Structures are given as structure tokens and as C-alpha cells.
Amino acid sequence: MARNSADTIINLIAVIVAVTNDTPRVLIVEQNLSGASGLLPSDIDPLSGSSHFSLPNGPFEPRHHPSLESGLRSWVAAQTGLDLYYVEQLYTFGNRYRDPGEIEGGPRVVSIAYIALTHEDAVDKENAHWRDWYSFLPWEDWRSGRPAFMEEHIKPALASWVRQAQSQSRRKQRQERVNVTFGQSAASEMDSVLSLERFELLYDANLVFEALRDERAAKRNSAPPLEAAELTKFDGMGTALVSDHRRILATALGRLRGKLAYRPVVFELLPGEFTLLQLQRVAEALSGAEMHKQNFRRLVANADLVEPIGRTSVVGRGRPAELFRFRREVLGEKLTVGLSRPIMRSSETRRTRHIRGI
């Protein structure tokens, strides 16, 4: 990766999102270890061989890129073959040592991340692959209720992390953090927007692989040989990515979920004509939460987001479903246009609320 200055590299990263067959998908590229920034030697990272999975990225080159976004689009086209449409800037990530090369005296890597919404078009690059978003953040998918491994693995591991605090005040702070992000011990609901906060908590509690990887990188050659048993605690905790790319993915997920309540981003992931069920399934895929059918349709109608086009579509053996289109005019009619802030609920809680019609 080329340097932008003697001490800093500006890196451009794309979180490219699609929803296909009710599954949220993200585009991942496989990078070779040799000469790539943000990657660890294979003796430190036993999960990689000679390559790593990352979000599409590349350096900002002022001589060749008229703007940051043009640089991003150029790198995405080169690495995946895709021509992006909807793109918005997400966040700038510049923490010290987020790139392991900085530990060895290399430059600080400042990454400017973007979200791109698209359809799952075929990619013509062998090292680019569409993957299920929740294969990286499995605790974020509550569409079938609270994941069983949260009760079996995450909950007791976080309880142990709280107990290990050296003082009562520190234990209280840790417990409050757990309660806010994952809910209290008896909680059956979780705020879907706090996806970044949950990943950072799991990182600090050493429950995701990146925590072990970064700890060993900081120790450099003084780290003891890695035992296979050390990796078992990461079973079911999702696929790791290079550097802090999984943290960036969690940031993007929280941004999109929050926007569901005030911006119609969900329509960027739909075809021009769709049924209300398709619209609901895409909203559920992003939010990680099942939505009550009647309530969802009431929200869509009240927001005046869609209009019928006078045709129907037949899917499977069901009755013909009316087709709709997004009313783009609504963007100039209202300051905020969206659905609702998604809440993840256990299966039992959902059944109770559906019976009550709320």
C-alpha cells in the first residue's frame, strides 16, 4: 500500500451491501499476505493460511483520485468489477495500532469507510465473494428469536468477564455495559442499533478472535506458542476479518439499522417493483428482527412510502400479490421518512406482542 505521507496512510474501505433471498449479503475480498497492510503473519494468525478476508479497500492516491469517493469507486471496480450506485460515507477509523504494521514502526493507517447499497450482481474477480453478513456477526440475527448460543456461550462468558474485574466499581461498570448492549439477564429484547457497541464489548471481553490476534501482535516474538484449545472459545463467534474490518462491518450495520427509522435506505436494496412482503423481508434482513405484518404495513401506509402500480405478481402457489413502487417524491415532502427503530425480541416475546397486536 502506498504511503500518503511519511507518517500516515489514508485507506478507503467499502461495505458493499445487498439483500438476496431474504439474506443480507456483504462483499468480501481475499487478500494475499505478502505486502498487504493490515494483515498479520501466518504464525500469529492460525486461521489464515496465505490469505485473509477483508472488505474491499485501497489507498487514496491524490495524484490519481480527484476525490475520496472516486478513489473508493476505482478500488472497488478493480477488486470486484462492480460499478457502485448508492454510496455514503460511514466513519473514519484511525486508532493507534489498528494496523499491525504500526507496531513495527510503520505509519498510522487512517481508514475512511463508506457504505454502498446495491443488488447482488455477479463479480468477475476470483478473490471477491458475497457472504452472509451474519456469518461475521451471528449474535445480531434474531429473526428466528434469540440465538441459542447467546444463552449457552456469550451470556456465561460475559458474566465471567464481569466477575474478573479488580474492583466493585469496575464490576458495576462492566455489568452496566453488558446490560445496555445485550440486555439484562432476564431481558428478552435487544436494541438492534447497538451492533458496534456489542462488538466492542465482545472484543474487550476477549470473545472474538481479533482480540487474541491483536494481543499476540502487540507482544510480537514474546507471545508463547498458540495452543489449539485457545481457539475453541471462538467457535460460533463468526468469521474474523483483517485489521478492524469486522468492527467497521458492525458500525455499518448499526448505521443502516438506525436509518430505517428516518431514511428510506431499504428501497435501494429492492427492485423497482416489489410486493409489501418483499419490502418487509428486506427490512427484517437488515434489522435482524422479525416484524409484525399488520403493524409493518400500517407504518408503510402512514409514511406514504409506496404506491401501487396496478399489477400483481405470483410467487409460488400463493395468491397474486399487489406490486408497489417507492414514492421518491416523499423525499421532498417530509424531513424524516422511514419505518421504525427495530427491536430484536425472543420468540416468546414476539408471540405475546403479536397476540396483543402491538
Image (cartoon, grey):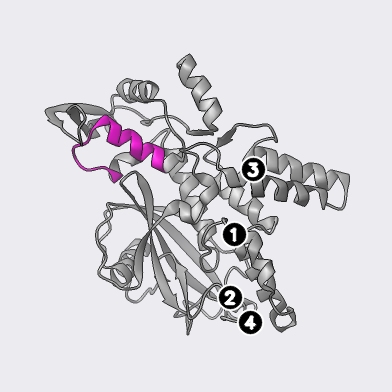
How far is the residue under mark 3 from the one under mark 4? Answer: 42 Å
Question: What crowding class fits label 4: few (fewer than 14 Cα within 10 Å), some (14-19), or many (20 or more)?
Answer: few
N-term-proximal mark, 1 vs 2: 2
Location of residue 115 with respect to 94 vertically, above or below = above
At x 34%, y 43%, the residue is 22
The residue wearing badge 2 is 46
Residue sitting nearer the eye, 241 or 94: 241
Location of residue 1 with respect to 82 vertically, above or below = below
- Residue 105, label in figure: 4
Mark whose residue sits in front, 3 or 4: 3
How far is the residue under mark 1 from the one under mark 3? Answer: 14 Å
The residue wearing badge 3 is 151
How far is the residue under mark 3 from the one under mark 2? Answer: 28 Å
Q: Quadrant of residue 191?
A: top right
Magenta stretch: dominant secondary structure: helix
Query: Under tag 3, what secondary structure?
Result: helix
Residue 290 lies, in percent from the top left, at 44, 33
Query: Under tag 4, what secondary structure?
Result: loop
N-term-proximal mark, 3 vs 2: 2
N-term-proximal mark, 3 vs 4: 4
Question: What crowding class fits label 1: few (fewer than 14 Cα within 10 Å), some (14-19), or many (20 or more)?
Answer: few
Image: magenta residue range: 269-285
At x 57%, y 72%, the residue is 99
